[in-house]
Image (cartoon, helix red, strand yellow):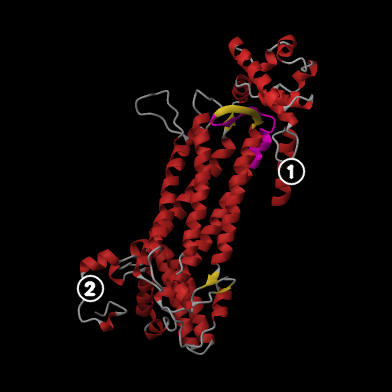
Amino acid sequence: MSAKLWGGRFAESTSTLVERFSESVSFDARLYRHDIRGSIAHARMLAAVGVLTADDVAAIVKGLGDIEAEIDAGQFEWKTELEDVHMNIEARLTERIGDAGKRLHTGRSRNDQVATDIRLYVRDAIDDVLALIDTLAGALLDLAETEADTVMPGFTHLQIAQPVTFGHHLLAWREQLLRDHSRFVDARRRMNLLPLGAAALAGTVYPIDRARVAAELGFDGVTENSLDTVSDRDFAIEFCAAASLLMVHLSRWSEELILWATPMFGFVDLPDRFCTGSSIMPQKKNPDVPELVRGKTARVIGDLTALLVLMKGQPLAYNRDNQEDKEPLFDAIDTVTICLQVFGEMMPHVKANRPRMREAAFRGFSTATDLADYLVKKGMAFRDAHHVVGSAVAHAAKQGCDLSELSLETLQGFSPTIAADVFEVITLDGSVAARDHIGGTAPAQVRAAIARARQQTG
């Protein structure tokens, strides 16, 4: 029974099957840095309030530093019989420094300890994700500037709708990313409160200084209610929710890149190093990176669902169920991180096929709405203009040409209101240039949006 730090109550050893079933060190060992940081801050606070001696805290801090070095060097022996990262580190500390190691756990529980470790871990993960979002947003901005004048078809229902610029389309992706950024920032702010001090569920009888620990660990303050503190996993769910929505955005981009890279579209060329070939068809260039990102989106959504279902039936306060929070959370962190990394490296090297994009926009009667707007400006009711243009489109389709290729005489056959100036608005360039307002697709507005973005990001 000596191997169990909680074993005094029990008359028989834990079943080896139960040990295998209940251990978490195989996946929560990644928390070791955060566990050590939290323990050092806790020990220093205990010394400051007179619970530990200066000698004890000095031994604890040095011992924990040595253990961190052991783990970094791959020399630490993780033991499943010690269940988790916390007990493995505490047991090793006691081996190294004796009774001082046994006094470290004074005034805390594994319940508030793990809640602190996970918050520290997720906080660092959010900081990493935010940096990766910034990198990707910057890549989109650079590419949008290069393609500010590139005309392509805009789609609704995956049917050609109106001409836009590729730069405008890329800035649309960036807007989604900026909202993702704000959600992670908001989640980080809400979770940045210290759980230590809640102990098992009711607080502690020791004269702890939670504010001191919070300041040392970079928290904005302390949690207010001990029952909620040890059972709260909202912050993990919020991370996975923000990550899920981010992955949905990356998946939508992936779907467009996959379509655009096909010979049927031919709008973009993806770098060879981000694609793979076929084992049987030598001509193939498969967009595996976007396809995998699209597929990995399902994993992150599944991670979110797992956490929601995990928490939905739990009474206050802590329950062992919460051990199951880490694997989906860690998987979501790992998945969203690698997907942002690969997109951040790929996007600067995506090449637009400008002639093909322009040809596609030209072929789809994408300036039909411009003709309708032209007639409205001449005094025609919109519904009448809609009918006139629909008839003109049907005629052009039969002739196998675009509206802009119809003669003035032919166009006037649908409405005598049409004059020679119509050709200024039903060309592709005229159409995109006319959307010259904030949020519009005009190249001038794309450049203005880029300038504002660069000013905001410094």
The answer to which of 60 and 456 lies nearer the viewer is 456
Q: Is residue 168 above or below residue 132?
A: above
Residue type (three-letter) at the residue carrying disc 2: Thr
Q: Position of residue 330 (x, y in %)?
A: 43, 57
Residue beneath label 1, please?
451
Q: Secondary structure at mark 1?
A: helix
Is 152 left, or right, of 226 in this rendering? Answer: right
- Report if residue 22 is visible in the image: yes
Q: Is residue 415 above or below residue 93?
A: above
**Label 1 environment density (alpha carbons within 10 Å; few <14, some 14–19, many ≥20):** few
Q: Position of residue 239 (x, y in %)?
A: 50, 58
Is 418 left, or right, of 280 in this rendering? Answer: right
- Report if residue 367 is visible in the image: no
Residue beneath label 2, please?
14
Q: Secondary structure at mark 2?
A: loop
Residue type (three-letter) at the residue carrying disc 1: Ala
Quarter of image, res 365? top right
Dot 1 or dot 2, earlier in sequence = 2
* Residue at 49%, 66% in the rendered image: 119
Q: Is residue 266 above or below residue 248?
A: above
Task: Give residue 34's mark.
Answer: none
In the rendered structure, does residue 415 fall within the stretch colored magenta? no
**Label 2 environment density (alpha carbons within 10 Å; few <14, some 14–19, many ≥20):** few
* Residue at 75%, 38% in the rendered image: 437
The answer to which of 431 and 353 lies nearer the viewer is 431
Span of residues in magenta: 141-158
The answer to which of 35 and 110 lies nearer the viewer is 110
Is 370 left, or right, of 14 in this rendering? Answer: right
Total number of numbered labels? 2
Whole-number angstrom distance, CA of label 1 to CA of label 2: 65 Å
Q: Position of residue 174 (x, y in %)?
A: 62, 44
